[in-house]
Amino acid sequence: MSMETIKTECQEALAVVENADQLAAFWAKYLGKGGEVQKLMAGIKSVPNEEKKAYGQAVNEIKVWVQSLYDEKKVEIDKKAMMARYDEEVIDVTLPVKEVAAGNLHPLTCIKNEIIDVFVGMGFDVFEGPEIEDDDHNFTRLNVLKDHPSRDMQDTFWLTEDLLLRTHTSPGQIRVMDAQKPPIKVLVPGKVFRSDSDATHSPMFSQMEGLVVDKHITLCDLQGMLDQFVKALFSDAAKTRLRPSYFPFTEPSVEVDVSCFKCGGEGCSLCKGTGWIEVLGGGVVNNKVLENCGIDSSKYSGLAFGIGIERIAMLKYGINHMGKLFENDIEFLKQFKA
Ligand code: PHE
């Protein structure tokens, strides 16, 4: 092909190129290996010596010229391809989207988090112990001795002669005091298990243990903290009342009532006419328990409490059957969407 033919042909061929494939074919035909430009180059062999220089220059000019035509076209084709992609991938942001059904926290998780927030605000740490405990942690070192009638207060699921499903979160007290020296201020949330089942009891439920060990800790500290707790969870007007009780691991021991947040203390169906609702057990840590953990009870004293989380949830949300909290009925749970 002569130089002139190549020039006109190239222009004509490029004029009809519309896409990247056609452009690649153009490149192969004219600029690629064995293409028309290279053929012209090879033709230099048959050119007389004195014309070789001029011939070479002329071919080179053609090469540069075809290349520039090609480059120009490539920019045009690339741009066209990009615009086509934009058109294809366009998103109509005004289209209404399908609503995503997001879940929500379980009411027990909400209550647990609320309680943790209150006590963390007072400087408490959070610790979690195992659900399978041994007799030593669950009973003996908490001063619940073998054959002591108080073991009957809690119907235990025994796994072996020594292992059991913890009946309360109090073994967490022992684990914390074994691991840490006073001052101690810790919360132990967790599941506990007792062979018991009716409207207000379930074989599995949750507790929140609290333990404070330091110098000069008294029952007043317990009531002060619990006052803060009921105010945060129920209402600013809520108050606590301590009644004497018995737990082997606290001395003295108390049941703690909160003033009825429904009637404000007048007496109603929720508080069974008394104006008070029992919410937890607690007391001053028995010296024997401190000593069982190697803490000098002449220097240190402690307070402990155990809150039933389901009970608080039932009171707060007016739930009349504990089982509802474990059935996972989605319609029931949806009501607690924050
Ligand atoms: N562990 C007791 C229970 O489950 C509650 C409690 C905890 C009482 C801490 C006193 C101190 O009934």
Image: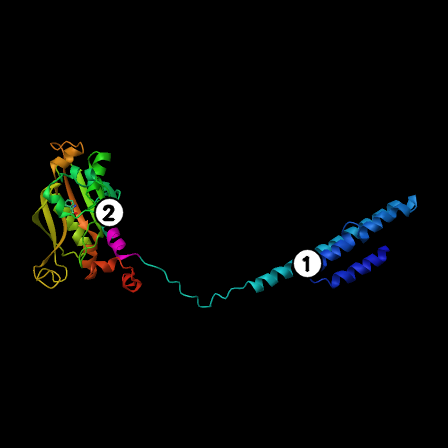
Distance, label 1 to label 2, CA atoms, is: 66 Å
**Magenta-span inclusion, residue 77:** no
Say which of marks 1 and 2 sits in front.
2
- Residue shown at the point (67%, 59%) measured from the top left: 77
Q: Is residue 330 above or below residue 258?
A: below
- Residue shown at the point (75%, 60%) measured from the top left: 14
Q: Nearer the viewer, residue 93 or 145?
A: 145
- The dot on residue 136 is none
Is label 1 in a helix, a strand or a loop?
A: helix
Is label 2 in a helix, a strand or a loop?
A: strand
In which quadrant will I find the N terminus? bottom right
Give the residues drawn in magenta, as a range. 105-113
Quarter where residue 336 is shown = bottom left
In the picture of the structure, the residue carrying the numbered disc 2 is 189
**Magenta-span inclusion, residue 111:** yes
Q: Is residue 261 above or below residue 287?
A: below
Q: Is residue 302 above or below residue 327?
A: above
In the picture of the structure, the residue carrying the numbered disc 1 is 20
Earlier in the chain: of badge 1 and badge 2, it is 1
Image side of residue 268 versus residue 66, left or right:
left
At label 2, the amino acid type is Pro
Q: Nearer the viewer, residue 4 or 136?
A: 136
Residue 283: x percent and y percent? 12, 44
Instruction: Name the residue at the front extreme.
Output: 161
At label 1, the amino acid type is Ala
- Residue shown at the point (71%, 58%) measured from the top left: 23
Assess disc 2: are there few (<14), some (14-19) or many (≥20) residues with their C-alpha within 10 Å of its C-alpha: many
